[in-house]
Amino acid sequence: MAQARLIDGKGIAASLRQRIGAAAASLRERDGVVAGLAAILVGDDPASDVYVRGKARACDAVGIASFEYRLPANVGIAAIGELIGKLNADDRVDGILVQLPLPRTLDPHLVVAALDPAKDVDGFHPINIGRLWGGGEPGLVPCTPDGVLMLLRSVSPDLSGADAVVLGRSQIVGRPIAGLLLAADCTVTIVHSRTRDSAAICRRADILIAAIGRPATVGADWIKPGATVIDVGINRLAVPERGMTLVGDVDFEAARQVAGAITPVPGGVGPMTIACLLRNTLLAACRRRGLPDPDLPGA
Ligand code: GUN
């Protein structure tokens, strides 16, 4: 059988960013609105620092204003609540994201619940989660899941009736992806650490989403021939003679011999996340002001 088609997340994200730049410019010129994104970073986790700086650069490139707030790791819930209250009320700020993970002393559910749901560009607020699962119009949708659906639609625009299996049940990725797939009329199964015979269930999937954070776990025998495989994993591994490399949750070389289409790591899901964050910021800027949604693909 021929090798799987590669799903070019890098290219799809680049063309989305270009359309976002054009939509941001038209919002500025037509409505006099400069969309703005505020990021809150608590503590000094190096990976989080890299993400937050990447988000600021991406905002600059498309003409979205970015604001950064750095708080010490020992900050109390009252101080972070006060900052969120100010940003909720600040008209220059359309989107607020709290970089996760937070230090153990802070309950992320409590912090996220303080956000104005209309500015919750991560889609983590209980109101946005409820809207995602409620079956009506979604509110703001989590960025990585939104990106995953966009990649799936690049392979097959109509997902209706597909057997979709989501490996992993995290709040940020697995659960919201399952919600979006259900909204797209897939038959959805969530496989997790307590599932019996995960490989057999995955092997039934027309669409397989791997989001467990364990390197190269999904082998060829987990994949139905011709299936579409989306690898959300980004695992840093020390490989002899190659130094640090990024590896997904899927054994890519084995899987591409069986799958019909597959995302690489890096260059698959990763670039879609920030592009979808920018898109959510523009959506929030328009919806808060009663303006029509910009014409951009996504949930
Ligand atoms: N940490 C890892 N992924 C994410 C994300 O999508 N949003 C936020 N806020 N923090 C994260």
Image (cartoon, rainbow, N blue to C red):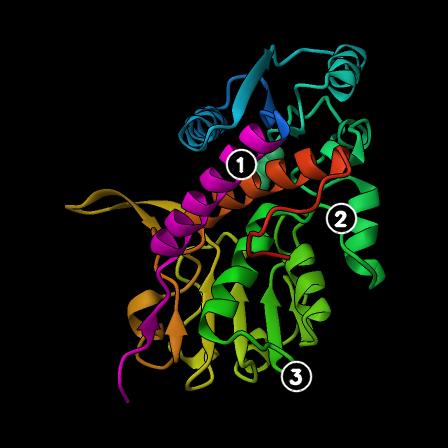
Instruction: Judge by depth and name the residue closer to the eye, 93 or 296.
Output: 296
Give the residue drawn at x 56%, y 62%.
149
Q: Which mark is residue 161?
A: 3
Please report whichever mark, 1 or 2, sits nearer to the chain's N-terminal start. Answer: 1
Answer whether labels 3 and 2 touch (C-beta < 8 Å): no
Residue to which mark 2 is pinned: 139
Residue 162 placement, left or right of 6:
right
Tell me where the magenta segment starts and ends, as one range.
1-30
Q: In front of the other: label 1 or label 2?
A: 1
Identify the residue at image location x=81%, y=32%.
Answer: 113
Q: Secondary structure at mark 3?
A: loop
Q: For the residues carrying marks 3 and 1, which lies nearer the camera in this image? A: 1
Residue wearing tag 1: 26
- Kind of residue sitting beneath label 2: Gly
Residue 91: x and y in percent read 72, 19
> Along the horizontal axis of the image, is 90 left or right of 204?
right
Residue nearest the viewer, comparing 64 with 235: 64
Residue situated in front as seen by the camera: 19 or 151: 19
Can residue 234 be seen by looking at this rendering? no
Quadrant position of the N terminus in the picture: bottom left
Residue 97, image quadrant: top right
The kind of residue tagged 3 is Gly
The alpha-carbon separation of the residues under discs 3 and 1 comes to 38 Å
Helix, strand or loop: magenta stretch: helix
Measured Cα–Cα span from mark 1 to mark 2? 23 Å
Q: Is residue 88 magenta?
A: no
